[in-house]
Image: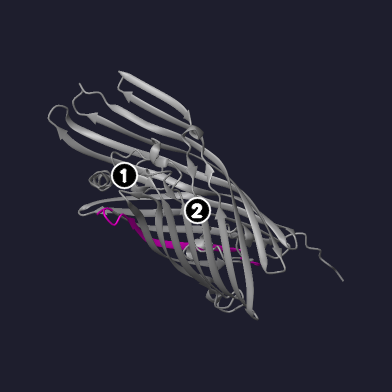
Amino acid sequence: MAAAIILLSAVGAKAQTDGTYVGYSPYSVFGIGQMHQIGTSWNRGMGGVGIAARSHRYINILNPASVTERDSLSFMVDFGLNGRLSLFSEVEKKGINATVNLDDFALSFPITKHSAMMVGVTPVSEVGYGISYDEIDVNSGLRTFTSKGNGGMYQVFIAGGITFFDRLSIGGQFNYRFGNIDKGSSLSSSNESYRTAVSGDSLQVHNFTGKIGLQYEQPLAVGHYLTIGATYQFSTKLLGNHIHYRELGDYDSNHSIKPLQEENLRMGSEIGVGISYRKREDLLIEVDYNFSDWRNSNFENVAGFSNVGDVRFASSFGQTIRAGFEYTPNRNDLRNFMNRCTYRGGVYFDSSYYTVDGAHVNAVGVTIGMTVPVFRWFNGISVSLDFGRRGLATSQLKETYFGYSLGFNLFDLWFMKRTYD
């Protein structure tokens, strides 16, 4: 465990805030980085739930089966941006970093009265860290160790769903994932007779994968519904190239390229289940559970995914529990604008898909959010805030973060036939 403490505490000693990062966390040094919470600002305001949510006002990209809940003539677009301010602390050492990035983009449209499709793009994982610390050596003088990582993965998706018997909806989704991850380290000395040593790995990754989902909606009374949802994300092999480089000043230089498929790397499968209660369009309450299995991903055996000193990194399984709600006081109130707004809240617990010295990296958080209606129909601007903390229970390094998401929900009716007297 000492190696992990030394590695991660370096962030507190000197946090690197120069450069542009997709996301920033010392724990993104492991595997393909920190997994991005897929979902729109609508989902995030409710703690990230959505497996059992059905709404004809918002696009739900967490379950392809939900795309069928819509007006048969509606066309919807959702896009947004997100940011995060993170504070890293370990005893008296502190560091801070801020990131802002474009987030999801999705559009949805009907096919028939009981079927619909959606397409879009969203982040999958984020790598961003900068670690630097100094030490005195009797021979080489002041030595500076630096480790940096940047990049991540995205996915382009196309999904479709169909409803049977007005209650059971089934959907499928095809994903193409792609990205670049760069991880490097260097050792320099104040004594010019010692050359600077640089090494690292550049990972050009992509793969094809799929996801299936279903939702069953049971009416309880007039305007009251209970929905059960489930999703399954398939495990697939990572494709692309692994570029390894090593340089020792002008004395030695070595570069090698190896296809990733030869290293038998896989992204884990994931199963999710959820249950929700909905009262018309006024109230939604939901609880979700996700389980991801990365134990056969082989990340711990491939340089660039796990080589962090002598830290015992291992692919494992991840778990997430989320709960949230949304409430609209009176959507048709013409006098009080605040009654037409929608308010959200949620909580979550997330356990990483890997272990460090046998322990998972856990995160807990609380979210709040709201949607402000704009113009007519269901157009709106959604805002969500996320307050959380991440860290190993066995390490004094803690990451406290404040995240925010801004989403734009566009809604229109197409192919309407107007009649005139």
In the image, is residue 275 above or below residue 14?
below
Please tell me the numbered disc located at residue 312.
1
Give the residue furthest to the top. Answer: 251
Which span is picked out in magenta?
A: 375-397
Q: Position of residue 273 (x, y in %)?
A: 53, 63
Please check the rendered image and state whether residue 295 is part of the magenta-colored stretch, yes or no.
Answer: no
Name the quarter where the C terminus is drawn.
bottom right
Q: What element does badge 2 sit on?
A: strand
Nearest to the eye among marks 1 and 2: give it: 1
Q: Residue at x 41, y 46 (%)?
A: 33
- Residues at circles 1 and 2 in contact by the CB criterion of under 8 Å: no
- How far apart marks 1 and 2 lie (CA) works out to 35 Å
Using residue 163 as the reference point, say whether residue 103 is left or right of it: left
Camera sees residue 62? no
* Residue for badge 2: 81
Q: What amino acid is found at the position of numbered circle 1 in the picture?
A: Arg
Magenta stretch encompasses residue 385: yes
| Secondary element at tag 1 | loop
Q: Residues within 10 Å of mark 2 (few under 14, many from 20)?
A: some
User: Where residue 10 appears, x then y in whole percent?
Assistant: 25, 44
Q: Quadrant of residue 76?
A: bottom right
Q: Can you see residue 420?
A: yes
The one of 248 and 314 positioned closer to us in this rendering = 314
Of the image marks 1 and 2, the number of the one nearer the N terminus: 2
Would residue 337 appear left or right of 90 to someone viewing this image?
A: right
Residue 345, label in figure: none
Label 2 sits on what residue type? Leu
Q: Name, please, the residue furthest toward the right.
A: 421
